[in-house]
Image (cartoon, rainbow, N blue to C red):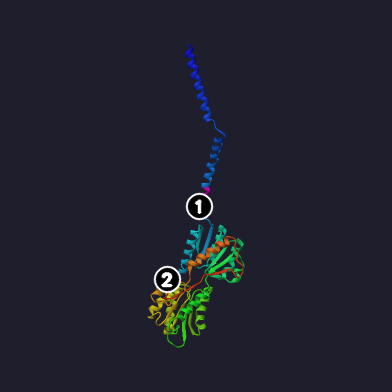
Amino acid sequence: MKKILALILAGCMVLSMAACGGSETAAPTEENTATTEETKEEAPAEKAEETAEEVAAEVPAGGKVGVCIYKFDDAFMTTYRNALQAILEEKGYEVSVVDGNNDQAKQTEQVNTFITQGVDALIINPVMTSAADTIIAAVKQANIPTVLINREPTAEQMAAYDKLVYVGCDAAQSGTFQGEIILETENKGDINGDGKVSYIMIQGDPENIDAQLRTEYSVKALTDAGMEVEQLDLQRGDWDRNKGQEIAQNDLAKFGDQIEVVFCNNDDMAIGALQAIQAAGRTVNEDIYLVGVDALDAALNEVVNGNLTGTVLNDAQSQATQAVACMEELLGGKTYAEGEQSVYVDYVKVTPDNASEFIK
């Protein structure tokens, strides 16, 4: 009996020790407690960090940019605005592009709407440079960094706001290149050999500084080279192909073989003029010369095919790249001093020798 009781007592002691050992294993040590608390604190932090990253990915890095184009159906500005939008979106900006329909009142309203919406920057292709004062006053009051493109206001207008810059090309250079293309022909534009170059000028919008300078400097290049010139006609074509065709058709009927050179302020009007020239039975580079500006693909093909004497590359891609670069400098706090607010991209002379290099 005593032996049995001893065995029972020994079994109880073993069970008691096992139970105590279990309690010690389960009891949290100081190290375990700290690790547990860290895990509890880290989980929500990691989740919050992931959420922040997701939100950051949804928000454009550079904010909102409003882009105003004078009209969408302008061939050159279509190339330009597509380049602008692609560059801005690739950089993470939220971009809104609007069509001014060649209506300054409408564009002014669009600018004011963008201001009300709180855009971070504006890129504006003015309908009319004469309206620049109104646009500049509005963006200055709203303190919005602004880049003007393609149509250049005066230096005095630009000086009113130091967060404003113009990006474009020197239109005088494009006119000079047009004149040089004519001077590089075998007879320097004097096809009939009467000692003077007789021409018609199909102008863009005469209110536009580019149209004014291209008109002036294309002819100036000839006179600076000692050529005598005769202007047979100057008509406003508003950058439009159909108007270019109509003006050339009427002038060819009126002046006939007297016309030796057709100067066009842009390629669209030059292509319209080409249609009229061909319909009249004339042959470009044989009995008449024809030049444009912009180096649109359609015009480049005509240069390659011998149907256009030459054009001048108005580099939309480079201008769009420069416009965005200037906009980002303004967003970064840069201001422009008076007299330094115009940034120019060079034109390139395009002739049959190099036209194929520019066809996309």
Magenta-drawn stretch, dominant element (helix, strand or loop): helix
Q: CA distance from mark 1 to mark 2?
A: 39 Å
Amino acid beneath label 1: Ala
Q: Which mark is residue 57?
A: 1
Farthest residue, direction front:
3
In the rendered image, is residue 201 in sight? no
Part of the protein shown in magenta: 51-57
Give the labeled residue for mark 2.
Answer: 357
In the picture, the quarter occupied by the C terminus is bottom left
Check if mark 1's residue and mark 2's residue have beta carbons within 8 Å.
Answer: no
Category of crowding for the residue at label 1, using alpha-carbon neighbours closer than 10 angstroms: few (below 14), some (14–19), many (at least 20): few
Question: Between residues 73 and 42, which one lies in front from this camera angle?
Answer: 42
Q: Residue at x 53, y 28 (%)?
A: 24
Q: Position of residue 151 (x, y in %)?
A: 53, 70
Q: Residue at x 57, y 66 (%)?
A: 165
Check the image and report above or below for 330 versus 253: above
